[in-house]
Amino acid sequence: MTREEAFDSLTKTEIPEHLHGGLVRYVVSGIRPGGFLCACICLNTEEAVMRAADETTKRSIPVITTWLLTEAPEEIVGTPELMEAWILTKAKERTYAARR
């Protein structure tokens, strides 16, 4: 998924716009988002509820997790281990690209 495809997909959802950047950076580049989105990525609803900044964000949890499960590659969503593996993989790619 490209950056443009991810942003385009997100604009068709009810996910608050202030969360789009963090989701795109994670899905496309493996950049760790804040604690709320990390909880959503790991499908830890209880943690996401506790970390939500406001009621609007809290109500968006089901939409965020649905978007992640339907739009993001399945190997990068669901557990902390999958999230950490994705972050590490993309960091290695960035390091390799920087050396070229």
Image: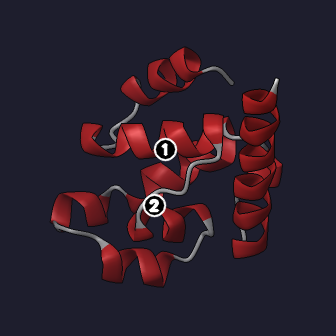
Q: Is residue 84 above or below residue 68?
A: below
Kind of residue at badge 2 = Leu
Near-viewer residue (62 or 18): 18
Q: Which mark is residue 23?
A: 1
- Give the quadrant of residue 47: bottom left
Q: Total marks drawn?
A: 2
Pick the quarter of the image with the C terminus: top right
Outermost residue on the front side: it is 99
Q: Are marks 1 and 2 in contact (CB under 8 Å)?
A: yes
Q: Is residue 90 above or below residue 28?
A: below
Q: How is the image coloured?
A: secondary structure
Near-viewer residue (56 or 17): 17
Element class at badge 1: helix
Pick the quarter of the image with the N terminus: top right
Residue under label 2, please give it. Answer: 37
- The residue drawn where x is 40% and y is 33% is 13
Determine crowd level at label 2: few under 14, some 14-19, many 20+ residues with C-alpha closer than 10 A.
Answer: many
Q: Is residue 30 above or below residue 54?
A: above
Left or right: residue 41 versus residue 56 is right
Q: Which mark is residue 60?
A: none
Left or right: residue 40 versus residue 48 is right
Q: Is residue 86 above or below residue 6?
A: below
- Give the quadrant of residue 20: top left
Left or right: residue 36 versus residue 68 is left
Q: Position of residue 48 (x, y in %)?
A: 42, 74
- The residue drawn where x is 52% and y is 66% is 38
- The residue drawn where x is 72% and y is 30% is 98
Q: Position of residue 12 (x, y in %)?
A: 41, 24
Q: Position of residue 41 (x, y in %)?
A: 59, 61
Marks 1 and 2, how far apart at CA = 7 Å
Kind of residue at badge 1 = Leu
- The residue drawn where x is 39% and y is 38% is 21
